[in-house]
């Protein structure tokens, strides 16, 4: 494996590890109590809640983007696999056993879009999307950990710290 590719993979693993910690913190903040349509409706007046939800949404989306758009393609390149469109890379990850379901990933992507685009107009849609994202965040983290564990087992990266 080329040195610069190994360095890039190590860098992305460090980034993803931090993003996971940040998402887990935000998840705990938002879901201390159920995120209902009533709580979603409070976002226009409760600035503290609005900041917590914004942090959760941002961190959820960032982790998904980093995994799908950056870490996965570099991991595939390190395996000398062909990379392509995100869906093709996800399908390959599923076949290689590090992703449970490429289709579920696309479902999670739709939630991401709902959380961003339906934010103001519908507290019901927002609360449903955020609730689903809260449940799906464990799948994002599992995928990240599977990529990291696989890369570590293959000796492609240094053992991650933290």
Image (cartoon, helix red, strand yellow):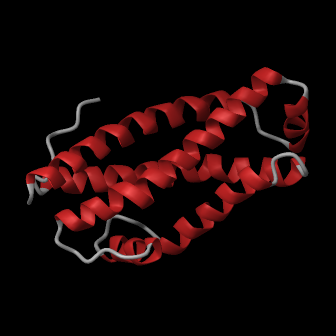
Q: Nearer the viewer, residue 127 or 157?
A: 157
Q: For the point 85% across and 24% down, which residue is it? A: 46
Give how far across and how far down residue 142 sits, in percent: 41, 52
Q: For the point 31% across and 69% down, which residue is it? A: 97
Q: Nearer the viewer, residue 83 or 128?
A: 83
Give how far across and how far down residue 69 sits, in percent: 43, 60
- Left or right of residue 4: residue 121: right
In the picture, residue 47 is in which quadrant?
A: top right
Please indicate, yes or no, whether residue 15 appears anywhere in the rendered image: yes
Q: Which of 95 and 120 is in front in this view?
A: 120
Give how far across and how far down residue 103 sits, in percent: 54, 74
Please indicate, yes or no, whether residue 31 appears anywhere in the rendered image: no
Q: Is residue 101 above or below residue 47?
A: below
Q: For the point 60% across and 35% down, which residue is it? A: 27
Q: Nearer the viewer, residue 157 or 128?
A: 157
Q: Looking at the rendering, in which quadrant would you find the C terminus? A: top left
All told, the count of numbered labels is 0
Q: For the point 52% across and 34% down, which residue is it? A: 24
In the picture, residue 94 is in which quadrant?
A: bottom left
- Left or right of residue 35: residue 65: left
Q: Looking at the rendering, in which quadrant would you find the N terminus? A: bottom left
Give how far across and how far down residue 10 sits, in percent: 22, 44
Q: In this view, does 113 lie above or below 120?
A: below
Query: As drawn, which residue projects farthest toward the front?
Result: 4
- Left or right of residue 65: residue 114: right
Q: Is residue 6 above or below residue 158?
A: below
């Amino acid at each position: 494996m080329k040195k610069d590719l190994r360095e890039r993979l190590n860098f992305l693993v460090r980034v993803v590890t931090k993003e996971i910690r940040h998402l887990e913190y935000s998840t705990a903040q938002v879901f201390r109590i159920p995120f209902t349509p009533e709580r979603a409706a409070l976002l226009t007046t409760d600035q503290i809640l609005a900041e917590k939800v914004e942090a959760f949404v941002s961190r959820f989306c960032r982790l998904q983007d980093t995994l799908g758009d950056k870490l996965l393609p570099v991991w595939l390149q390190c395996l000398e696999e062909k990379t392509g469109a995100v869906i093709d890379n996800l399908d390959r990850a599923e076949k290689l056993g590090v992703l449970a379901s490429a289709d579920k990933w696309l479902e999670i992507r739709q939630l991401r879009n709902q959380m961003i685009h339906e934010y103001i107009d519908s507290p019901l849609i927002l609360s449903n999307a955020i609730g689903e994202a809260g449940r799906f965040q464990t799948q994002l983290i599992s995928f990240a950990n599977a990529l990291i564990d696989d890369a570590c087992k293959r000796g492609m990266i240094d053992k991650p710290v933290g």
